[in-house]
Image: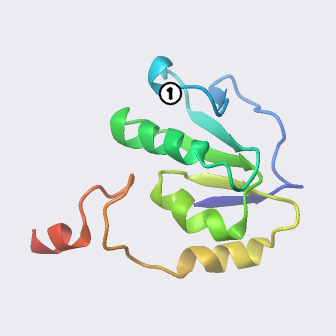
Amino acid sequence: MKLFSADTAPTEPQDLQVLVLANDADPRALSLNGVARIDLHFPSFTDGRAHSQAFLLRRRLAYQGEIRATGDVLVDQLPLLARNGFDAAVLRADQDLAVAERQLERFKSYYQGDAVQARPRFAREAA
């Protein structure tokens, strides 16, 4: 997962291939043709709608481009963000980038399936 600190990440999309998706938008209703990156916003760390949007984009819509988390993104959220299909995150200004990188290294594998690896570990190991 690519990590950006709030002060070094661009605040506005620099490319026409970037889609900024509102929390109440249904990704299934959008045309994703030509979209290279989708920015999903967390207005607060307790608002999980962007998690659902990322999961829909990856699993149901088979979106292969970058999904970036923006807004109130905390270090503690990073493992779940990665499991739900996010490729990048712009951390809140008070979050430490070094701590964020260590957080992503804490868990090498998960037993359950997720948006990135649909099959649970027992099914992957049996194959």
Q: Quadrant of the C terminus?
A: bottom left
Where 34 falls versus 90 (above or below)? above
The answer to whether 55 appears left or right of 2 in the picture is left
Above or below, 110 against 86 in this view is below
**Above or below — where is 101 with respect to 54?**
below
Image quadrant assignment for residue 41 = top right
State the image coordinates of residue 113 (x, y, percent, origin top left).
31, 61
- The answer to which of 30 and 44 lies nearer the viewer is 44
- Callout 1: 10 Å neighbours few (<14), some, many (20+)? some
Report the side of 43 relative to 61 (left or right).
Answer: right
Image quadrant assignment for residue 79: bottom right
Give the residue at the far front of this rendering. Answer: 46
What x and y, as percent, mark residue 94?
88, 67
**At numbered mark 1, what does the secondary structure look like: helix, strand or loop?**
helix
Residue in the image at 38% along x and 32% along y = 61
Q: Is residue 52 above or below residue 84?
A: above
As drawn, is 116 to the left or to the right of 72? left
Residue beneath disc 1: 27
